[in-house]
Image (spheres, rainbow, N blue to C red):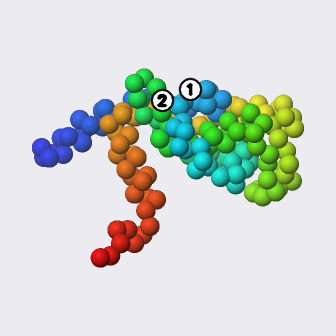
Amino acid sequence: MTAKFNRIDELRKDVVGNEGECSLNEISNQAIIPPSCYPLVTPEQINDYIHSFLLGIPAQKVVMDDRNGDAVVQQGYAAIIAYQRFASNQFTLLNSGVLPELAGVTWNDLPTVYQQTIKRFKVQYAVISDDASWNLIRRNWLQTLPKDYPPAK
């Protein structure tokens, strides 16, 4: 390989510090979600995530950066927020999605077996370096721009 590609291997070693799988309950208790992310998650998303957890449909990988020893979520926060809101009885399921018959159900209405199913739902995660998180933030930000950005002069 040529010298211009050597930096790729050097940086890759520092990017991902830890990868694995844990329960929603575990990641919810350990990860920090920036407050600005909470308003971005819609009731429909929360509803769909709860249905997915109950049915065992995999969620998006949670990517966190290691900021001063804290795991700050950069990607995949919607699943965690959905769990937090539902499990704290702050959300009532909607009449939509794959299980419309659950409309009006809250966490307290769920039989214990289904509460445990959601709590134990496994999510994959990766902890990346703080430097690498800026690349992820930029990539995610660019995906939200309109297709005609920047506007023509």
Looking at the image, residue 16 sits to the left or right of residue 2; the answer is right
Q: Residue at x 38, y 68 (%)?
A: 149
Residue 18 lies, in percent from the top left, at 43, 29
Q: Which quarter of the figure is the C terminus placed in?
A: bottom left
Q: Does residue 76 appear anywhere in the picture?
A: no
Q: Residue at x 84, y 52 (%)?
A: 103
Looking at the image, residue 6 sits to the left or right of residue 30; the answer is left
Looking at the image, residue 103 sits to the left or right of residue 50; the answer is right
Which of these two is toward me, 78 or 126?
Answer: 78
Q: CA distance from mark 2 to mark 1?
A: 7 Å
Residue 99 lies, in percent from the top left, at 80, 53
Q: Is residue 101 above or below residue 106?
A: below
Residue 16 lies, in percent from the top left, at 38, 34
Q: Earlier in the sequence, mark 2 or mark 1?
A: 1
Name the amino acid, label 1.
Gln
Q: Which residue is mark 1?
A: 30
Which of these two is toward me, 132 or 153?
Answer: 153
Q: Which residue is mark 2?
A: 71
Q: Is residue 38 above or below residue 129?
A: below
Q: Does residue 103 appear anywhere in the picture?
A: yes
Write down the quadrant of residue 8 in the picture: top left
Q: Residue at x 76, y 43 (%)?
A: 91
